């Protein structure tokens, strides 16, 4: 099974790319780009590109980084166990209907819908 790539490691390797460009590309399984960076090491292009990519990785939150570089892995989930009083079950049902409406309108993806739905159902279960 593939290992989840960490944003902080990618940032560190991209910054280190000022000296040895392309390390972050190999880490992110973009071997073609890594080889290209190494072949052009004598120019400033890979070094500058590495720093620009470090800033880009830094500007991404975890979910965006995962969408870009961890597509083959299941999304990271956080288990939250919060008990809901019986009178709150109807509120959770209403929230589920609203969540389904957002999915149907295309405002959230199927995977986002499923993740939120599971969290809500876990609260009443």
Image: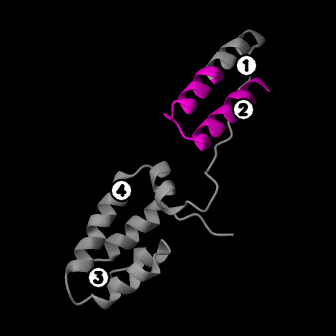
Quarter of the image with the C terminus in it = top right
- Residue under label 3, please give it: 19
How many numbered discs, if any? Answer: 4
Q: Give SS at disc 2.
A: loop
Give the residue at x 64% y 39%.
115
- Residue under label 2, please give it: 81
Q: Earlier in the sequence, mark 1 or mark 3?
A: 3
Q: Nearer the viewer, residue 68 or 5?
A: 68
- x, y (%) of residue 76? 61, 51
User: Between marks 2 and 3, how big is the CA–CA gap?
Assistant: 46 Å
Farthest left residue? Answer: 44
Give the residue at x 48% y 74%.
27
Q: Earlier in the sequence, mark 2 or mark 3?
A: 3
Quarter of the image with the N terminus in it = bottom right
User: Looking at the picture, does residue 48 appear above or below residue 43?
Assistant: above
Residue 58 is marked as: 4
Tell me if 114 is positioned left or right of 29 in this view.
Answer: right
Tell me if 19 is positioned left or right of 96 in this view.
Answer: left
Q: Nearer the viewer, residue 104 or 76?
A: 104
Farthest front residue? Answer: 105
Q: Earlier in the sequence, mark 2 or mark 4?
A: 4
Instruction: Tell whether label 3 touches label 2 (CB within 8 Å).
Output: no
User: Between marks 1 and 4, how big is the CA–CA gap?
Assistant: 37 Å
């Amino acid at each position: 099974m593939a290992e989840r790539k960490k944003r902080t490691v990618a940032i560190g390797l991209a910054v280190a790319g000022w000296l040895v460009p392309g390390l972050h590309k190999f880490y992110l399984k973009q071997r073609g780009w890594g080889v290209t960076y190494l072949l052009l090491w004598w120019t400033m292009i890979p070094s500058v590109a590495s720093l620009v990519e470090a800033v880009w990785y830094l500007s991404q939150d975890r979910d965006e980084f995962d969408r870009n570089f961890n597509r083959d892995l299941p999304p990271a989930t956080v288990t939250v166990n919060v008990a809901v009083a019986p009178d709150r079950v109807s509120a959770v049902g209403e929230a589920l209907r609203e969540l389904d409406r957002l999915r149907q309108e295309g405002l959230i993806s199927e995977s986002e819908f499923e993740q939120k739905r599971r969290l809500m159902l876990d609260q009443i279960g």
